[in-house]
């Protein structure tokens, strides 16, 4: 169920959810858009009785820096935003809650997709993706430096057609990691910026292929983005 946060405000008193999440990516310092999303998530969690999970999306390892991770904790504490699940500090994140500890879950999902014939290998770079015909070339999924893409429905937006589920570096993509994590943790309320609308459609499609009915049936709410003034 994909709805805007604004239109849902009046319905929150009647709706109840089990769990929502704050899921920043520590590839830079927290910005005002993150703060807005954190605060809105905390507000809706209070109204709906949902617990808050802190899930730090760190699969893009080359861009992750310890100071960016610490900034997440510092910002949440400064804003007095509580969370009941997930890491409480950097050490807990590193030793227990990093997505690196959940790699077996992602590998299981990738194996399922492969065994069901849902994937094809792709050697394209980002710059030549538009001319990609890799699905016609029968490239090997076992060839190093090939990404894994999923066959998709024509109903999906062009921006997420045949999206990547395993990157060339061997790590799961954001789309796959997000779906597997939300399914694993039982998240049923997702709040995100409207810029992720197409991404959400891709994730719902992936969840349906994997049989993750809990994700497919979750409520996804969107908020407008904070934009810098032109003045």
Image (tube, grey):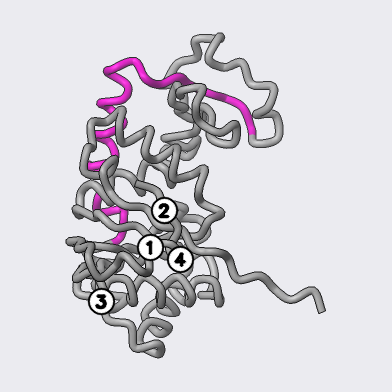
Crowding around mark 3 (Cα neighbors within 10 Å: few <14, some 14 to 19, many 20+) is some
User: Which numbered mark, 3 or 1, is in the foreground of this view?
Assistant: 1
Query: As rendered, which of 137 and 43 lies closer to the eye?
Result: 43
Query: According to the image, label 1 marks what residue?
Result: 8
Q: CA distance from mark 2 to mark 1?
A: 7 Å
- Residue 182: x and y in percent read 27, 51
Q: CA distance from mark 2 to mark 4?
A: 9 Å
Q: Secondary structure at mark 1?
A: helix
Instruction: Evaluate if marks 4 and 1 touch, with contact meaning CB atoms under 8 Å apart.
Output: yes
Q: Residue at x 27, y 81 (%)?
A: 82
Instruction: Evaluate if marks 2 and 1 touch, with contact meaning CB atoms under 8 Å apart.
Output: yes
- Residue 226: x and y in percent read 60, 71
Query: According to the image, label 3 marks what residue?
Result: 46
Tell me: 93 left or right of 7: left
Query: As rendered, which of 6 and 206 lies closer to the eye?
Result: 6
- Provide the residue span drawn in magenta: 98-125
The number of discs equals 4
Of mark 2 and mark 3, the one earlier in the sequence is 2
- Residue 191: x and y in percent read 39, 61
Q: Residue at x 28, y 36 (%)?
A: 107
Query: According to the image, label 4 marks what residue?
Result: 6
Q: Is residue 210 visible?
A: yes
Query: As rendered, which of 181 and 219 lies closer to the eye?
Result: 219
């Amino acid at each position: 169920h994909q709805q805007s946060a604004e239109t849902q405000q009046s319905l929150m008193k009647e709706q109840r959810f089990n769990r929502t999440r704050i899921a920043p990516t520590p590839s830079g310092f927290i910005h005002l858009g993150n703060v807005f999303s954190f605060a809105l998530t905390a507000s809706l969690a209070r109204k709906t009785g949902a617990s808050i999970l802190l899930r730090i999306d760190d699969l893009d390892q080359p861009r992750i820096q310890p100071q960016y991770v610490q900034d997440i904790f510092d910002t949440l504490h400064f804003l007095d935003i509580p969370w009941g699940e997930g890491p409480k500090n950097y050490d807990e994140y590193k030793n227990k809650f990093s997505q690196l500890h959940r790699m077996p879950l992602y590998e299981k999902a990738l194996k399922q997709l492969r065994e069901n014939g849902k994937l094809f290998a792709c050697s394209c770079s980002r710059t030549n993706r538009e001319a990609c015909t890799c699905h016609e070339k029968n490239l090997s999924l076992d060839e190093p430096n090939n990404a894994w893409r999923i066959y998709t429905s024509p109903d999906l937006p062009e921006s997420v057609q045949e999206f990547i589920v395993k990157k060339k570096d061997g790590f799961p993509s954001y789309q796959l990691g997000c779906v597997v994590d939300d399914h694993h943790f039982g998240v049923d309320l997702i709040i995100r910026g409207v810029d992720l609308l197409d991404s959400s459609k891709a994730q719902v499609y992936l969840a349906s292929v994997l049989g993750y009915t809990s994700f497919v049936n979750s409520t996804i709410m969107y908020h407008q983005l904070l934009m810098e003034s032109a003045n």
